[in-house]
């Protein structure tokens, strides 16, 4: 008994009625949030002393590392939450 295999070809073309979950404005907010998070982590980095036996208190506990960088990171995460929760402009009008 011979069986024939039927193969189905999946078409990866988008259908005409597909919509994206987010619109361009949401993605722009997301990119801004990621940029702020990255800037915060860059401001927090560093502090390596050339002499490993010397502790530089002012460099490690500077206002930039202790205050400014964590605030920027938290603002970046808040922007990410806003970007995810924000409804696209088309849905707001309906």
Image (spheres, rainbow, N blue to C red):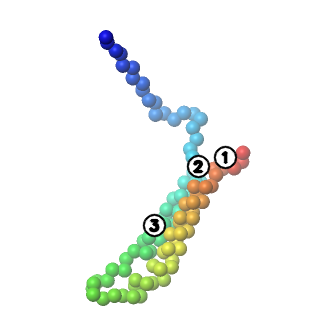
Task: Describe the element under mark 2 as helix, strand or loop.
Answer: loop
> Which of the 4 quarters of the picture holds residue 9?
top left
Assess disc 3: are there few (<14), some (14-19) or many (≥20) residues with their C-alpha within 10 Å of its C-alpha: some
Q: Residue at x 48, y 33 (%)?
A: 13
- The C terminus is located in which quarter? top right
Q: Earlier in the sequence, mark 2 or mark 3?
A: 2
Q: Which residue is mark 3?
A: 38
Task: Describe the element under mark 3 as helix, strand or loop.
Answer: helix
- The N terminus is located in which quarter? top left
Q: Earlier in the sequence, mark 3 or mark 1?
A: 3
Residue 26, position as x, y percentages in the image = 58, 54
Q: Which label sits on residue 90?
A: 1
Give the vertical position of 56 relative to 71 (above or below).
below
Q: Which residue is mark 2?
A: 23
- The answer to the question of whether label 1 and label 2 lie on touching residues, with beta carbons closer than 8 A, is yes
Q: Earlier in the sequence, mark 1 or mark 2?
A: 2
Q: Which label sits on residue 36?
A: none
Task: Describe the element under mark 1 as helix, strand or loop.
Answer: helix
Estimate the spatial distance between the alpha carbons at disc 3 and disc 1, rounded to whole Å.
Answer: 31 Å
């Amino acid at each position: 008994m011979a069986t024939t295999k039927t193969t189905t070809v999946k078409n990866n073309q988008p259908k005409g009625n597909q919509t994206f979950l987010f619109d361009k404005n949401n993605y722009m907010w997301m990119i801004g949030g990621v940029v702020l998070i990255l800037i915060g982590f860059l401001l927090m980095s560093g502090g390596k002393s050339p002499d490993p036996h010397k502790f530089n208190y002012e460099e490690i506990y500077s206002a930039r590392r202790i205050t400014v960088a964590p605030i920027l990171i938290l603002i970046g995460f808040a922007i990410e939450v806003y970007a995810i929760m924000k409804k696209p402009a088309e849905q707001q009008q309906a």
